[in-house]
Amino acid sequence: MIRRRISPFLACLLTIAFGLVLRRFGYAVHLPFEIVKYGGSILWGAMVYWLLATALPGARRITTTSAAMIVAALVEFSRLWHMPALDAFRLTTAGALLLGRVFSPWNILAYAIGIAAALALDWALSKRERFA
């Protein structure tokens, strides 16, 4: 059980690090807007998967994947809801990274890609652990 928590937790930390590096330095190294914008969204979706895999180590992967998609979609749709305190939080760096600012259906697609990639990596790592 401990091993099932550590691997997703480390993957989550690495995903967060890659996302922050991409957002901070992506434009500086002349990556296209689409790579920086949607690459960050893909990594955000993967992060949600890894967080849930860490929090729910005994859950089946389909449960973790479904929950990650629901969380990601709810966060994206929450951008359509406006109230002063929430909008003020979205203007902060933490708010922009956690909740985003503007609704985009393309983000939901990017989250799904990130969640699917995390699922595939999770599955591959679990197969490797079985044969190690």
Image: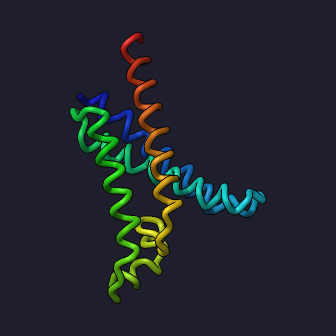
Residue 84, compared with residue 16, is above or below; it is: below
Instruction: Between residue 74 and residue 128, name the one nearer to us.
Output: 74
List x then y, in percent, for residue 99. Answer: 41, 68
List x then y, in percent, for residue 131. Answer: 40, 10
Rendered image quadrant of residue 49: top left
Q: Which residue in the rendered view is the most extreme toward the right?
A: 30
Residue 66, compared with residue 129, is above or below; it is: below
For the image, the number of numbered tags is: 0
Looking at the image, what colour scheme do you see? rainbow
Viewed as shown, does residue 32 lie left or right of 17?
Answer: right
- Name the residue rendered at 39%, 18% in the picture: 129
Of the 4 image quadrants, the one containing the N terminus is top left
- Name the residue rendered at 45%, 48% in the picture: 112
Residue 96, compared with residue 21, is above or below; it is: below
- Name the residue rendered at 63%, 62% in the picture: 24
Rendered image quadrant of residue 98: bottom left
Q: Which residue in the rendered view is the most extreme toward the bottom?
A: 84
- Name the residue rendered at 37%, 68% in the picture: 77
Of the 4 image quadrants, the one containing the C terminus is top left
Instruction: Between residue 67 and residue 3, name the one nearer to us.
Output: 67
Q: Which residue in the rendered view is the most extreme toward the top?
A: 131
List x then y, in percent, for residue 17. Answer: 53, 51
List x then y, in percent, for residue 120. Answer: 46, 31
Residue 86, compared with residue 12, is above or below; it is: below
